[in-house]
Image (cartoon, rainbow, N blue to C red):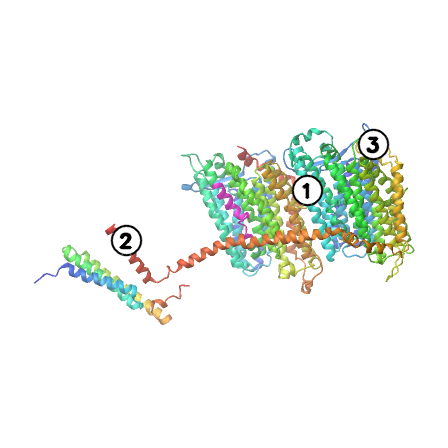
Amino acid sequence: MEYTLLILLLPLVSFFVLGLLGTRLKPCVAGWIGTLVLAVLTLVAYVTAWEYFSMPRVEGVYATLVPLNFEWLHFTQNLHLDLGILLDPISVMMLVVITTVSLMVHIYSMGYMNGERGFQRYYAFLSLFSFSMLGLVVATNIFQMYIFWELVGVSSYLLIGFYYTKPEAIAASKKAFIVTRFADLGFLIGILVLSFYTKTFSFDLLTSGDSSIFAGAAGSTFLGASVISWAMALIFIGGAGKSAMFPLHIWLPDAMEGPTPVSALIHAATMVVAGVYLVARLFPVYYFEAPDVLVAIAVIGAFTSLYAAVVACVQTDIKRVLAFSTISQIGFMMVALGVSGMEGHEGLGYMASMFHLFTHAMFKALLFLGAGAIIHAVHSNEMDRMGGLRKQLPVTHLTFLIACLAIAGIPPFSGFFSKDEILSAAFMFSPWIGWTMSVIAGLTAFYMFRLYYNIFWGKPAVHEHEPHEAPVNMTLPLVVLAAITCVAGFIPFGHFVTADGLVYDIHLNWTVAGTSIVIACVGIAIATVLYMKGTNPVPTRLAERFKGFYTAAYHRFYLDELWLFVTKRIIFGYISRPLAWFDRHVVDGAMNGMALVTQKVSWAIRGLQSGQVQQYAFIFLLGTLIIVLLLLYV
Amino acid sequence: MNFLSLFVLIPLLMMLGLWVSADMKQIRAVMVTGASMLLVLSLGLLASFLSERAAGNTAEMLYMADVMWFAPLNIHYAVGVDGISVAMLLLSSVIVFTGVFASWNMNPMPKEFFLWFCLLSVGVFGFFISIDLFTMFMFYEIALIPMYLLIGVWGTGRKEYSAMKLTLMLMGGSALLLVGILGIYFNSAPEGGNYTMNILEIAQNQMPMNAQRLFFPLTFVGFGVLGALFPFHTWSPDGHASAPTSVSMLHAGVLMKLGGYGCFRVAIFLMPEAAHELSWIFIILTGISVVYGAFSACVQTDLKYINAYSSVSHCGLVLFAILMLNQTAMTGAVLQMLSHGLMTALFFALIGMIYGRTHTRDIREMSGLMKVMPFLSVCYVIAGLASLGLPGLSGFVAEMTVFVGAFQNADTFHRVFTIIACTSIVITAVYILRVVGKLLYGTVANKDHLALTDAAWYERLSVITLIVCIAVIGMAPLWISDMIHGSLAPVIEQLTK
Amino acid sequence: MEEIRMEYYLIISTLMLFIGIYGFITRRNLLAVLISVELMLNSVDINFVVFNRYLFPDHLEGLFFSLFAIGVSAAETAVAIAIIINIYRNIRSIQTRELNTMKH
């Protein structure tokens, strides 16, 4: 399957063509180049997936293929950085997800970004992002993943800062990059530790289940935990940064300053799930070598999910609501991985996590693109500038509703199936986590329908221009994604992706499923009562009643203030400024001081060299006299 | 006549040519011809070196030549190159080439400026081809002295102060170095043997341990001053800030590499036991350099100061990696020298071009340059991304090799300092993005800046050459990394003897 | 008649030398300094002649030497006076304390 090389080459070439030619291309030409390349790419990805999954299974498992792998950089005898392509069920699944969403976003952007300054640049960056993200998922080794990990980071930085004249966008892009960079530091150190003890970067060796490569780490502990646990925890920090796990999630809501299609592609469907993908990729290592870290992942995932769901309930900017909902849903995926086992039914969580990743990518991209269409229509992100839009935007309304139902977990939409599997896995692991996740599912239904009603129902807001439906190149992706959302739940996902690779038949556990449907319906019902008419006074009164909590949640529990405090105060105020002062005045002062002392001393002894010959003669004479006297009497 | 000597001869001929040239046109013609010849020569050297190696020539140094120069002290004019020198020569010729274009409109006294510029190149090239300690030291001094005039006469701001400070501090370093070199010379042979200045011959003999213990720190600090070793780095911010563009480029790009190169070619290679024993002191100092430079860069407001402090951090990483005393980390060190040389030259070139237009280097007085000069701004972003270690550009390759190499030392001390050094990748991101955000993004605050023009063709040529080099190393690093890795084998052999 | 002893000459020349040294160190006027230098030179000349006459009467080296010294000192005086005149033309003074324009 050597043609898979095209998957990396095409977007790279497209990036260079668009980036180097830049404004010499007409905007629409640039758009078409980008979109067509991506269409071809999607086709290649589908063919790859088709061919891969129609291969005969070996011992019940799909073989891992490495169609290409070459040495890119040489470190030591054992450690070398290879670049290559690795095909296994999850990477092929990711290829499909990424290319599909990316293609939809490319098409959508032709309408949404039409007439924007820097249209060519936008498509160049999208190509760069597609390249990096695809490189990330097909990585054959952890260092290749790190390379593309950084590249997606920078594409995300460039795209968030696309409107580079807007101060908020600049700040947001900087914040996104630095926070994830900080997490990547953990990732890097984790890689260093892991590779030092295992003498390899290769996923193949690491996840083979052969524990002999971890023998080098046997007995090495640090602060009571094994070094492999430390390494895996550090690697997870990297994943947590990209996947916006608490407390590294702070960059994601701000990242909504970027163009909305970018939010759909990068900050909802693909890049932010890279952390989940990373954990899934290294799942056997976590499961066999660092089970304690896996528990921590579950707990962090659950907490993040709960936190984000609560915050999402009170946000008023529709993109922020969606951003927090994304964080919450990624929390679900992390929990699923954390509670998962390896074999058969035990490995349900792993399968569920990947399934949810897949379905979530589709319906969340749909939600964001829908939000883009709404913003396009009313020129604002704020809920109170919307209301009653269901008449003006019928297509958007319908597709948005489908996505809301999917995320809320109402059958037969895709979200129901994947979320249900996650809840089953969570209940299997511990009822505590199971119930927590169920409550979060209810919250999800509530805040999504709060959003839905506030946009499409309730009191119509006053608009300068009458809102109108988006052009067809924007609605087409919505319809496509909505269609996928409607049917994706019926994919026998367990036939393709499971923890141990064997076929697993999804069967609904009706106790869990029933509970979750009831909880979702309750959430929707509450939202309906409170927000459908837009005149119910209860929400305001509740906000008044729990003012402290409401304000705290509205300000995202002041974590951004903490971030500002850390960067502005601690890094700049307490470290950099004193250090710079120290450098100028102490270190440099010492050097200047030495120069000054030299100068002072020379001024002091300068009087001796007066240039007065008479004085010299006198001293000469005096000296002679002393010497003579000394010679005579001593 | 050995063709390595051409590296010294061509700049000398360029000086001759400059002497007889009458106007700017002729000066440019001489400089461009000479610099292009150097570039071609170093590319030819690279090709020939690689083919020799591919043909199985495993000699430690290739193209050796040796002429007796001063018999009583056994001083030779001895030249020869290994993969590391080839890489450094390539770097130097690229920077000289781009430096010429970056100072296309030198004013006043262009002739004199370029004369000194050529003399500086003589020193730099001579240093990298020498394998005789004394010749090496002589070229080192030749490279330092012109700096004083280049900064003092053609500089900006507090130029006399900076030039004096830079020269005095570097001279202080070379005083230590001279003592170190003499010390090595008088211990270069066992009792009764013939003393020698030839590096390869000295390496054959083991120097007595007490001599090593004394002269290793002297030599290391001596070269370290030029490599911006904490706390002897303070000449760097002032010096770079005052120097004219192409001098900054050459100085940060190549001259600071003389320090790193000397550290391992002389200090580590000739005194391996002392290196093992005393490396911890310098690991602490360089570890401080790395983080300290990065943090200090965060709050500077002058573009050149930011870049100078960032150089302190990056060059600190070079010395840090050398002190890790293993092949991977040292490969990383040389890669980092190359990468930092190209990157910082690019930065200084861009800063010079921006300064030439806006007449300020204060980031608080500029904003939104992306709109006004898109080409320069995009290049600045690329330079920034290279600096913060984006994969696909040279910085990443170098840093990762350094970190992986450094991590192979299994004790806690090395681990802790490696992790401290790793944190610099985050801090680097902080200051780079801060500058990019303030300088290039946003709206143009100063209305006068709206009328500024983007880069002219010679500026584009200079900048694009550097970017291409950065990208080539960043995207296809294996050949150069292998070349360096192979050439380090003798050093490692010394260290493990 | 009592013979004139060598010591008398030497006392004179010693006195002259020290007067010359004293003058050289203390006088502020260039001409006076020059005169002091001449005094010292002359005292040495006297010594040459005296030693020659009393200790080695059949040799003439001392006389020759003093003649040389006189010649050289004459030339030296000429040059010195020329310099002093030039200095005077330039700065209207021949006081040593004021001759410091080249010092800084």
Both on one chain, marks 1 and 2? yes
Disc 1 or 3, which lies upstream in sequence? 1
**Quick one: SS at disc 2?**
helix
Given the image, what chain letter belongs to the residue carrying mark 2?
A
Residue position marked by numbered label 3 in the rendering:
A345
Residue position marked by numbered label 2 in the rendering:
A627
Image position of A303 (left or right of B475): right
Residue B136 point in image, percent of width and height? 49, 44
Can you tell which of label 3 and label 2 is closer to the viewer? 3
Q: What is the spatial separation of the Cα atoms under label 1 and label 3, in whole angstroms?
A: 33 Å
Residue A224 sits above or below residue A552 on the image: above
Given the image, what chain letter belongs to the residue carrying mark 3?
A
Residue C49 point in image, percent of width and height? 18, 59
Residue B490 point in image, percent of width and height? 55, 35
Q: What is the spatial separation of the Cα atoms under label 3 and label 2, in whole angstroms?
A: 107 Å
Can you tell which of label 1 and label 3 is closer to the viewer? 3
Q: Which residues lie in the magenta part?
A: B215-236
- Disc 3, disc 2: CB below 8 Å? no
- Of residue C103 and residue A5, the one placed in the foreground of this image is C103
Figure disc tally: 3
Magenta stretch contains residue B13: no
Disc 1 or 2, which lies upstream in sequence? 1
Magenta stretch: dominant secondary structure: helix
Residue position marked by numbered label 1 in the rendering:
A186
Kind of residue at disc 1: Gly
Q: Quick one: which residue is furthest to the front in this view?
A: A545
Both on one chain, marks 1 and 3? yes
Image position of B278 (left or right of A127): left
